[in-house]
Amino acid sequence: MLLDVNHLSVEFQESQGSIKAVRNISFSVDKGETLVILGESGCGKSVSMQAIMGLFHDQANINIKGSVKLHGHELLTLNEQKRHQIRGKQISMIFQDPMSSLNPTMKIGDQIAEVLITHKAYAKQEAWQEAILLLEKTRISDAHLRVNQYPFELSGGMLQRVMIAMSIACKPDILIADEPTTALDVSVQEQILDLLKTLQAEEAMSLILITHDFGVACQMADQVAVMYAGKIIEYGALDSVFYDTGHPYTKKLKASIPRLDHPQGKPLTVIEGSPPDLFNPPKGCAFTARCDFAMRICNKKHPQAYTLNSEKTSDSTHGSPSHCADCWIHDDDCPKPIKTAYRKIK
Amino acid sequence: MTTKQTSAKTLEPPKMDEKEFLPYKGRTPDIIQRPSRNYWQQAFSKLKTNPSALISLLIIIALVVFTLIGDKIWTVDPYDQDLTQISSPPSFNKKALVIPDKIHYQPIIQPSKEEYTLKTTSSGMSVIGTPTTQFIAFKWQPVAGAKGYQIFRHEYLPQHIDDLGVPLGENEGGEHVSYLDALRLEPIDYFYSIIPIFDEGQSTQYSTIKLTAMDAIPLSDAVELGIIPIHQKTNYLGKFIHLPAHPLGTDYLGRDLLARLIEGAKTSLFIGVLAPLIFVFLGMLYGGISGFLGGKADEIMMRFVDFIIALPFLLFMILFKVAFGIGPGESGIFPMLMALILLSWPSVARLIRGQVLQLKEMPYIQASKLMGANVFHLTLKHMLPNVTGLLLVTLTFAIPSAIFTEAFLSFIGMGVVPPTPSWGSLCNDGIHTLLTHPHELFFPALFISVTVLAFNLLGDGLRDAFDVKMKEDQR
Amino acid sequence: MSETLHTQKTTSYPWLAYAIKRLISGVIAIWFIATATFFGMHLIPGDPLSSEKKMSPQIRKNLEARYGLDKPLLTQYGIFLKNIAKGDFGISFTQENRRVNDIIREHFPISALLGVLALIFATLGGIFLGAFAATHKNQLSDHVIMLMVILVVSVPGFVFAALSQLGIMKINDAFNTDFPIAGFSSLSHLVVPSIVLGLGTLAYLTRLMRSSLLDIESADYIRTAKAKGLSNAQIFAKHKLRNALLPVVTVLGPAVAGITTGGFVVEMIFAIPGLGKYFVEAVQQLDYTVIMGTAVFYGGFLVLTVILVDILYGWVDPRIQVVK
């Protein structure tokens, strides 16, 4: 397994208490695979990725527990120098807002070349040549002109291409894309996703894509992990998560995808209520308050992860994890009528 | 293959109570937990957690009290000159010897009889009477062949004849061997030196005596100050009496510094608070109107503002002061006020205009407009509440800078005119006696600094509490 | 690709157009300063010669002729403007036969030297202390620096000048040293005055540098730089420093103005024969030609400084060039 994340927890110490942003999540990514992490804002998806990148390391008020292994080597306990060597070279990351994610007073070329100079000891001249090639790879127009421009002179879509060029400069094993299309025009979103897919194939890298858009997940994912209130509540291959959804939250997410055949005049589906307070996460399932199938037990105890289709897949040798979901509905003791009612809804 | 979630499945799950699977009734989808507080409550509760801002607020209140009722408590007249205590350091309980008004001193004339050479020790020199702050008299052995003497006074022991510098006085004639010094004496040690002068010039020998002056007050002064009753005044001669207290000392004319600081606070805070109040108000009007009108009018109005802001501020303050001129009997407060207001409103106008431009684009303002709100409603209900925080912070920061400006101008003699005291002009007075009486600069400087510090810290606190961005709208 | 380039370059030399535009507005500002000074001086009750005691009508007439005061006001104004354009500021009223140009030529270099030293001390010190405080945020050194800053900001400059003079004197007394206390005969005379003069600006810049670095700390592009695998030192040198310096550059104009006017007082207290001291003396003695001449000169100098700083800013921050 390329990347192995086990029991990762992230807590922010604030003056009013600690925010449990990520609560004991585990997942893994294999070579060349795409994992999509799906969830609404504030569910801890970005935080977990930044923790994996070690971006919180110099912040004293952030507690990180668990383990992150790349090629079997622990990342969380690396010393600073080693961490710098891995970031940008073996794992790289692109962010939500390309406009603010690039240094406003530095030329595009310099910002890309910097990665090559740091990790591959390129000379400046070489690095600039390479930067142009990298930009061409991202299908940007007039790459040789772009290198001499500043971020404010480019559009959001172009800047996200620059970010991508920068992140693939050292041919990383894993690219983490944190909502790479959220801040962009809809027309550009599609192009960026296409580009990511193509590059992933060309460079044979793994991709972790963070999104709140089930549509994007369907388009990109091999595996899907659905996060809610700091926990992964459903995890599995795209097909089984989509067609054989194991968690009421995932069902609601799916139902809220706008569809072309949506009846006119009928309001779009929304998930009522708001996510729980992460200062004080509930003892039981965090979704209880918003769940149509909530049972007494749900409020008391967090469900274990139930494997849903162990008979079908779970061939551990190929590395694709079995489909599992954290919901009491899958418990053997759960009354039949509830299970049936759950299966009936879309 | 590692899927931790599945591993739990291998454990035998404990059997559940059937009731646990009954529907959960406590579904409460939309919970808003925090009590809603308005803008001001929020700002003040935030301000309350800021100790330095709170202390500053207390200091400012204390200053206002000091200014307004200080002269009711400390009733000493700030213009009264107590010539018995000139440049006196802080004192509460100073005693002085009452001495006769007339100085009993007869110059001693004693021709040289024998050969006498001066030694650097005080041999041959002796004091006449009691040395006091009113006068010190002393005599010395005549030096043979001298045709006169130069007398020097120092506050430290001269190490060498070259240290003596400029003489305090000169006696003509070798037989005039005494000297009376009544020049600005203070209750400290004095070193008097004499050099005989011969026909061929100054002697290379000198002699020094150390005399300690005692606080003394002439009888009639004591009566005049009301310390001793007039009908039995002679009883007090040669006795010690208490002098009027000067908690912060006196200035170079013997005026009580505390009283002058209270009086000066009136001037400094009057200018420092009134000018900002007026120019913040004017700036708000101008900037508000400019931002509200928008378009061409806004552009022209802002051109004018840019122009005034580009002028060098203090240079123009000085020029304004010169141009206004100060007639006899005027204090110079009004010209300073005018100059401050004329030069300071544009930066406030620019700040407010930026805020108003931003607000105009806010959806709720647009909505209010669409609902048919008129200009008054928009201004009073939407614009004004949203700029009050900014205005308050601007005002709080404008006050210390106005106080600084007043101090700067008064310091270079371009501010208020003597005898009206202001903290800046008190500093200016104090600097002349800095080397001998540092308290005369220290106290007014302390008042300026503490006031400015308090307003600055309060401003910082208010800015954080109201979450105001002080950055001006970029042109 | 459907993306389009948003840059619009109206001229081929946007930088030059910007500079010229600013220079024109600067000339207008100087004209305004000159005009305001001229009419201000002539509005004063009495006239420039009334302070001279006991003057026979004949002498008065001669003097009026000499200073051109016998002509109508507008004619005088015209002559004044024409002379300024030629760079001629006239003859002093109180120092007979001394040309204002000579006063400026002799004394401005001293002021400029003092000012430049103070500015260097303030900027380098402010940048260093601000960066140090920001990188040691909430540690003791940060608190100490910020406490010093708030204290320095709250004490008038002339108090520092006076106190430092007193301090040198005490040191000289105690250790029998001979540090210069006042006057100007060597560069060492300017050491303490320039420190005192730069102190306020230093405190202001320290505060600015610290807050601007802390703002940048949480900027997205710093996160990007970290994700790229740059070391902390690289991030600081290549990404944080330059961006943090931008606000510092914008306040250099006001800083120069502050140091220039602060110099009036420092020159007075330390008896440094700079132009500031002469300006203040001229103001106190109502020496009209010197006031007008030096005011216009100072005004022009400060206006030009602000323009230079703006142009410098355009050079440091690539984003400015495109803004109209």
Image: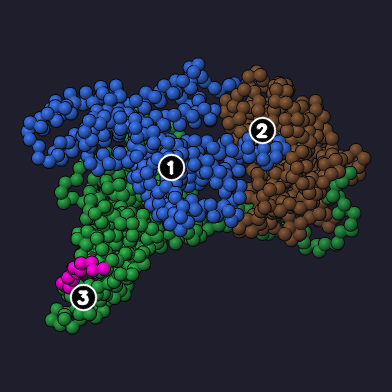
Chain colours: A brown, B green, C blue
The residue range painted magenta reads B102-114
State the residue in front, B291 or C55: C55
User: Considering only vertical position in the picture, is B147 above or below C32?
Assistant: below
Q: What residue is shown at x 75% (from left), y 38% (from top)?
A: A87
State the separation of the CA atoms marked 1 and 3. Answer: 50 Å
Q: Secondary structure at mark 2?
A: loop
Q: Amino acid at mark 2?
A: Thr
Q: What residue is shown at x 28% (from left), y 25% (from top)?
A: C88
Which mark, by number, is residue C190? 1
From the viewer's perspective, is the residue at label 1 or at label 3 nearer?
Answer: 3
Residue A275 is inside the magenta segment: no
Chain at tag 2: A
Which mark, by number, is residue B99? 3
Farthest left residue in view: C57
Quadrant housing the N terminus of chain C: top right
**Residue at the spot of label 2:** A181
Q: Amino acid at mark 1?
A: Leu
Farthest top residue in view: C12
Instruction: Judge the density around disc 3: few (<14), some (14-19), many (≥20) Cα neighbours within 10 Å.
Output: many
User: Considering only vertical position in the picture, is C310 above or below B119?
Assistant: above
Q: What residue is shown at x 29% (from left), y 76% (from top)?
A: B95
State the residue in front, C168 or C70: C168
Q: Quick check: marks 2 and 3 in contact, CB under 8 Å?
A: no
Which x, y percent locates residue B74? 27, 68
Q: Can you tell which quarter of the image residue C118 is in?
A: top left
Q: Is residue B240 left or right of residue B327?
A: right
From the viewer's perspective, is the residue at label 1 or at label 2 nearer?
Answer: 1
